[in-house]
Image (cartoon, grey):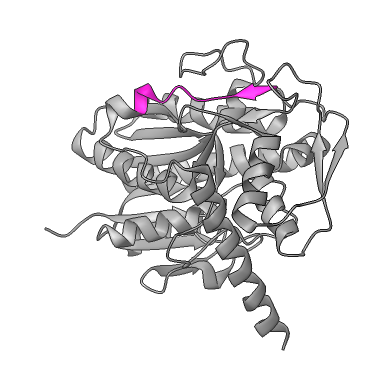
Amino acid sequence: MTKSTVLVTGGAGYIGSHAVLALLDAGYPVVVLDNLVTGFRWAVDPRATFVQGSIDDEPLVRSTLEAHGVAAIMHFAGSIIVPESVENPLKYYENNTAASRVLIEAAVSTGVRHLIFSSTAATYGMPEAMPITESTPTQPINPYGRSKLMTEQMLGDVAAAHPLNFCALRYFNVAGADPQGRTGQSTAGATHLIKVAVEAATGKRGHIDVYGTDYPTQDGTCIRDYIHVSDLAAAHVHALEALLADPGRSYTLNCGYGRGFSVLEVLDAVDRVTNMTIDRRMQGRRAGDPPELIADNSAILAALPWRPARDDLDAIIADALAWERRLAERRQAEAA
């Protein structure tokens, strides 16, 4: 039986390019829509059809959905840097909320019935209790989190009024790279801890800044739930299959491993994997950093057959490091 064609928005980006691989490897035809502002054309697997453009270009989105007979959308396109969202909120409400409305309207008008949305644990804000369940109050503390929560709410309203079901996956801290080395985190100026740490390990940075050493945690640094990007991509494929199997049901699910590591534990692991010592510089706290963010992942484990396959901090770092070295080789070749 021929599988449904899936449109992946933002499929030239970090998480999107891994979802493209997971879909293709599972036998789904894939169309990627990406404006390449932060993504890379070379990150899109050649088995996918590529369309360059933005999700807020409704005529383009509609014609793409119709021309390829798209049955489902995985929506990754958007802006993701929390401090930038505070400095430039209108950009985030435009790229994340308003543009998503255009995409959803195009989906409804062309009869697309399934949408998987790339959401975030930032929708919870500063939760008082750990671990975080899907019923933890959503009280985002920055425009990034609010822009994503608005899209979740929009999807809920649209699903109630139209024949469309959705799955919003609330990611915790995504890290690592495709174990086969086909894609990874390539954007310049990344702020994610493991990405920054492997940049330091490969000489792209001279040191690592540790923001805050006086949190109420075992070593005073922030604790986060790190999930391997390939496990996250697999969760999207399982979510798609759940939506296709039961068109009347929608989901909002946390995506994490349910355990956390502190900043210092992560840096110790990077030192261990790389067999070197990265220069750490202790700084003051950053505004808006919760002491601890850990997912309760019991709902996704109950709803989907997804099971983590790469729940190992050292392995996550090893895959990130291998990609960082591959990326350096690519950049050298491009400069030559």
How many discs mark residues in the rendered view?
0
Residue 143 counted in the magenta span = no
Q: Is residue 67 above or below residue 118?
A: below
State whether residue 91 appears in this view.
Answer: yes
x 19%, y 37%: residue: 245
Image location of residue 86, percent across then percent down: 79, 34
| Residue 182, position as x, y percentages in the image | 46, 68
Task: Indicate the position of residue 253 as horizontal and vertical percent values.
Answer: 41, 28
Splitting the image into 4 quarters, where does residue 69 fall?
Answer: bottom left
Task: Report the quarter where the N terminus lies.
Answer: bottom left
Q: Name which residue lies at 71% across and 43% down.
A: 81
Figure quadrant of residue 269:
top right
Q: Is residue 57 visible?
A: no
Highlighted range, magenta: 291-300
Residue at left offset 33%, top offset 56%: 23
State yes or no: residue 293 in magenta.
yes
**In the rendered image, which quarter contains the C terminus?**
bottom right
205 or 154: nearer the viewer: 205
Nearer-the-camera pick, 243 or 135 = 135
Q: Relative to residue 63, is residue 251 depicted above or below? A: above
Residue, x 37% and y 40% (percent of image)?
Answer: 308
Position of residue 45 in the picture relative to residue 42 (left or right)? left
Q: Residue furthest left?
A: 1
Observer-nearest of 109 and 304: 304
Above or below, comparing residue 260 to residue 312 in the picture: above
Identify whether 245 is placed above or below 231: above
Residue at far bottom of view = 336
